[in-house]
Image: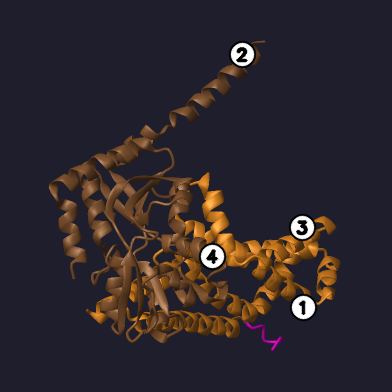
């Protein structure tokens, strides 16, 4: 009998210990450590990229640095491929991720999203001299199309064009990074590149010989920071600081700095 | 844009590439040698088990194993991407190195084991003093092949967020839109690393050659 009581006590304690590892603990653990580990994929100018000094910078990076500063911590940046970021947040490898993430129902099942910090549009980029008609986005189905895999554009093309059978699978090309897709557009292996409007503008200005024939909201919309599923304490804290930064006009200034060219 | 600075940024990833290789290759050798000995000199069960290990490990692409180890196993044990990547590559490599060592063991004639036992050595002594010294020498040429493969496979750890040469080349390619320059730089560095390694191993092979065994 004594043993049984002891067993019950041990089991209860064990559960209590597990229970204690609640989400508010994650936030206080971050604050205690004085640092938040944030993942990004620094291959997406102007949101996140590597500058000449080899440091990670960009709109997202500066914004996150300021958010962390106001939370009283510093950011430890971890770079990994875009595809790996959600899994890394889910597995607790990183505390949060900022990488121009759009809200997406599929993603929302495994991680949480903060409030929006910026709103983006989709765009279609083509070679100069393109004679096709893309005034109706659904016309995309008539061309060789490229997009970055794992992005909302990839999801939109798959759901709206590929799955209904409008765009044959072998006419749709998924790339690991947007610059690879731009190279193929330049080489003529794809005819239309669907991407976020802002990075598409960066691609057009850097590659030359390309033009954006359509921009509007199809798959995109607000950008959010990704935090672990159910981590409301961290989410609320980031939202609080974000609101502050938006009221002060900090976000707007930053957007002007990175997106105005 | 300062090209020299970008190239320097890519080149500084070499430390990670060398680090990953220096962990993966020796740990694969130790594990592979033990498995090969088990395979050749132990009973039927361990032969079957080590064969299964070798078949499975060589049947899975290294990148898949890397993701499994990193995202599933290291969910409970907290491994850094660098360590997780290096150890996973070591495990992948151990299966190939086991086959290399096994082949080398089998090429030492069976009579030597019998002779060693006949002069009173235990099996363990015979393996340590007669078989292994010859085996490891014989294994150097195929092993230098494996060393080159591991150096090149170390580029896979970029998927876990280790800023090694390939990942840095990707980042520079994205920020400068000069993919040729970035990847050519990476190619040159990999080539130099593999070239130096195979030269060193060639030298080692010559130095350790048994005179009577040309």
In the picture of the structure, the residue carrying the numbered disc 2 is: A5
Q: Which mark is residue B107?
A: 1
Q: Report the Cα–Cα distance between label 3 and label 4.
A: 22 Å
- At mark 1, the secondary structure is helix
Q: Which shade is chain A? A: brown
Figure quadrant of residue B205: bottom right
Write down which chain is painted orange.
B
Residue at figure coordinates x 27%, y 41% from the top left = A239
Figure quadrant of residue B19: bottom left
- Answer yes or no: are tags 2 and 3 on the same subunit: no
Q: Report the Cα–Cα distance between label 2 and label 1.
A: 63 Å
Magenta stretch encompasses residue A94: no
Please provide percent x and percent y for residue B174.
34, 73
| Front disc: 2 or 4 | 2
Determine the chain carrying the residue at label 4: B
Q: Report the Cα–Cα distance between label 2 and label 3.
A: 43 Å
Query: What are the residue bounds of the magenta stretch?
Result: B209-214
- Answer yes or no: are tags 4 and 1 on the same subunit: yes
| Front disc: 3 or 1 | 3
In the picture of the structure, the residue carrying the numbered disc 3 is: B49
User: Is residue B108 depicted above or below A242 in this figure?
Assistant: below
In the picture of the structure, the residue carrying the numbered disc 4 is: B24
Give left or right: position of B79 versus A218.
right
- Answer yes or no: are tags 3 and 1 on the same subunit: yes
Determine the chain carrying the residue at label 1: B
Give left or right: position of A123 versus B85.
left
Q: Which quadrant is the N terminus of chain A positioned in?
A: top right
Disc 2 vs disc 3: Cβ atoms closer than 8 Å? no
For label 2, count other residues whose C-alpha is less than 10 Å away and answer few (under 14), some (14-19) or many (20+): few
Figure quadrant of residue B212: bottom right
Magenta stretch encompasses residue B211: yes
């Amino acid at each position: 009998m004594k043993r049984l009581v002891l067993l019950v006590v041990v089991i209860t304690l064990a559960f209590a210990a597990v229970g204690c590892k609640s989400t508010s603990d994650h936030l206080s653990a971050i604050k205690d450590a004085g640092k938040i580990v944030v993942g990004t994929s620094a291959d997406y100018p102007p949101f996140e990229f590597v500058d000449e000094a080899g440091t990670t910078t960009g709109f997202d990076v500066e914004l996150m640095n300021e958010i962390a500063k106001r939370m009283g911590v510093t950011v430890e940046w971890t770079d990994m491929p875009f595809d790996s970021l959600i899994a890394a947040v889910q597995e607790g490898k990183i505390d949060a991720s900022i990488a121009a993430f759009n809200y997406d129902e599929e993603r929302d099942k495994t991680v949480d999203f903060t409030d929006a910090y910026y709103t983006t549009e989709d765009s279609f980029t083509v070679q100069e001299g393109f004679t096709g008609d893309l005034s109706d986005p659904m016309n995309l189905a008539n061309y060789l199309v490229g997009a970055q895999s794992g992005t909302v554009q990839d999801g939109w093309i798959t759901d709206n064009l590929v799955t209904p059978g409008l765009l044959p699978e072998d006419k749709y090309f998924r790339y690991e990074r947007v610059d690879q897709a731009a190279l193929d557009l330049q080489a003529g292996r794809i005819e239309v590149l669907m991407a976020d409007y802002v990075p598409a503008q960066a691609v057009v200005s850097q590659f030359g010989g390309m033009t954006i024939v359509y921009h509007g909201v199809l798959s995109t919309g607000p950008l959010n920071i990704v935090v672990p599923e159910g981590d409301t304490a961290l989410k609320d804290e980031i939202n609080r600081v974000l609101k502050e930064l938006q009221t002060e006009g900090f976000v707007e200034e930053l957007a002007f700095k990175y997106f105005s060219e | 844009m300062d090209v020299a600075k970008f190239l320097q940024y890519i080149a500084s990833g070499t430390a990670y590439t060398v680090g990953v290789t220096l962990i993966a290759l020796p740990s694969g050798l130790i594990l592979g040698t033990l498995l090969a000995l088990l395979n050749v000199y132990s009973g039927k069960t361990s032969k079957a088990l080590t064969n299964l290990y070798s078949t499975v490990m060589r049947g899975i692409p290294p990148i898949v194993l890397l993701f499994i180890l990193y995202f599933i196993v290291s969910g409970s044990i907290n491994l850094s991407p660098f360590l997780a990547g290096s150890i996973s590559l070591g495990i992948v490599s151990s299966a190939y190195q086991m086959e290399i060592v096994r082949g080398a063991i089998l090429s030492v004639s069976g009579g030597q084991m019998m002779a060693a036992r006949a002069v009173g050595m235990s099996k363990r002594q015979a393996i340590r003093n007669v078989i292994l010294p010859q085996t490891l020498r014989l294994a150097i040429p195929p092993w230098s092949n494996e060393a080159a493969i591991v150096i090149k496979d170390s580029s896979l750890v970029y998927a876990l967020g280790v800023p090694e040469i390939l990942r840095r080349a990707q980042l520079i390619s994205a920020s400068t839109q000069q993919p040729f320059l970035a990847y050519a730089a990476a190619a040159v560095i990999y080539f130099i690393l593999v070239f130096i390694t195979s030269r060193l191993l060639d030298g080692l092979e010559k130095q350790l050659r048994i005179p009577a065994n040309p």
